[in-house]
């Protein structure tokens, strides 16, 4: 085993993904309380305090609300862009042995046996990134909170053995749903969130077909339904001659079963 992955939570009420290599234990985002992160780590058989680092994609609460407490209570390193750090006022965090490290989009860095590439994404945040993590020849990439899929972002996903990909909303459900029009426009815009339709288009037109696991994440509870997201992606995979059996869906309320890669 080179990498183990569990999406602890994904959705508008909080996001966190746990990644364990042979030497390090990482979180991508910490949008849950310290207590809730600990509870979900225990649920998958992991040490609730066993985090070496947290990789922060951007400053929105559902991705970063738990970072301040984590760096205060655990000796870990938080990695974030300059813009994200400024938006979070990270210079004011109480560290107690933790560290804040500034990263640059497109510039790789290493934590233990994990090689990590942060890459710029179109989203309405200060300096948002997504992350690819490679260890032992295995690559996982998580891409959520992205308004559309430009070619330079799609290229970062190539070669991934596991792809965690936003499938936020069904366009029709969003159009007729309860949100005010300005919020609907933001979600559908080029700095908003990826729709089920956009995921299908990515799979048909830009996806390299390499992943053993495609995990649909950040599903809206009001503007999507898990079966709609699954069906759209499954149709696109079948059109490519690929098996829909490699699809998995995340949950807001419980961690996904750990995947060993």
Image (cartoon, rainbow, N blue to C red):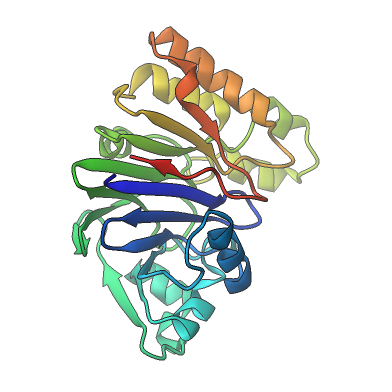
Q: Is residue 92 above or below residue 214?
A: below
- Image height check: is 182 above or below 100? above
The picture places residue 218, in percent across and down from the top left corner, at 57, 44
Instruction: Measuring from the top left, give residue 254's x and y in whole percent.
Output: 64, 50
Total marks drawn?
0
Residue at x 57% of width, y 73% of height: 34
Q: Nearer the viewer, residue 132 or 106?
A: 132
Question: In the image as oriented, which residue stretches furthest toward the front?
Answer: 45
Which residue occupies the extreme right position in the image? 178
Above-or-below relation of 79 to 187: below
Q: Nearer the viewer, residue 32 or 46?
A: 46
Tell me what residue is drawn at x 47 percent, y 45 percent.
258
Please tell me in which quadrant of the rendered image residue 229 appears. Answer: top right
User: As rendered, which of 73 and 209 lies closer to the eye?
Assistant: 73
User: Is residue 244 depicted above or below 93 in this figure?
Assistant: above
Q: Is residue 229 visible?
A: yes
x%, y% of residue 114? 23, 56
Visible in this render: residue 122?
no
Quadrant into which the N terminus falls: top left
Q: Which image quarter is the C terminus in?
A: top left
The residue located at (53%, 54%) in the rendering is 44
Examine the image and state in which quarter residue 189 appears.
top right
Looking at the picture, tell me which residue is in the foreground, 260 or 79.
Answer: 260
Query: In x, y percent, where is residue 118?
Result: 29, 55
Determine whether, in the image, residue 35 is placed left or right of residue 162: right
């Amino acid at each position: 085993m080179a990498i183990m992955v569990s999406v602890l939570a994904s959705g508008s009420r909080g996001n966190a993904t746990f990644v364990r290599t042979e030497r390090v234990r990482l979180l991508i985002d910490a949008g849950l309380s310290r207590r809730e992160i600990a509870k979900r780590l225990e649920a998958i058989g992991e040490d609730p305090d066993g985090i070496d680092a947290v990789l922060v994609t951007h400053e929105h609460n559902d991705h970063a609300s738990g970072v301040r407490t984590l760096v205060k209570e655990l000796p870990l390193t938080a990695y974030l862009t300059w813009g994200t750090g400024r938006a979070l006022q990270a210079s004011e965090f109480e560290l107690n042995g933790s560290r804040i490290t500034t990263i640059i989009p497109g510039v790789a860095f290493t934590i233990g046996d994990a090689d990590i590439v942060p890459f710029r994404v179109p989203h309405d945040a200060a300096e948002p990134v997504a992350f690819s993590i490679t260890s032992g020849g295995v690559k996982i990439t998580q891409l959520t909170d992205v308004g559309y899929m430009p070619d330079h972002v799609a290229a970062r996903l190539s070669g991934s053995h596991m792809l965690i990909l936003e499938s936020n909303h069904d366009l029709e459900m969003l159009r007729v749903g309860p949100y005010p029009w300005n919020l609907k426009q933001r979600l559908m815009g080029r700095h908003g969130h990826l729709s089920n339709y956009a995921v299908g288009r990515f799979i048909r037109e830009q996806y390299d077909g390499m992943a053993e696991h495609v995990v649909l994440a950040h599903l809206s509870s009001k503007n999507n339904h898990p079966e709609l997201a699954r069906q759209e992606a499954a149709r696109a995979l079948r059109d490519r001659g690929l098996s829909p059996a490699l699809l998995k869906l995340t949950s807001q309320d419980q961690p996904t079963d750990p995947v060993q890669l």
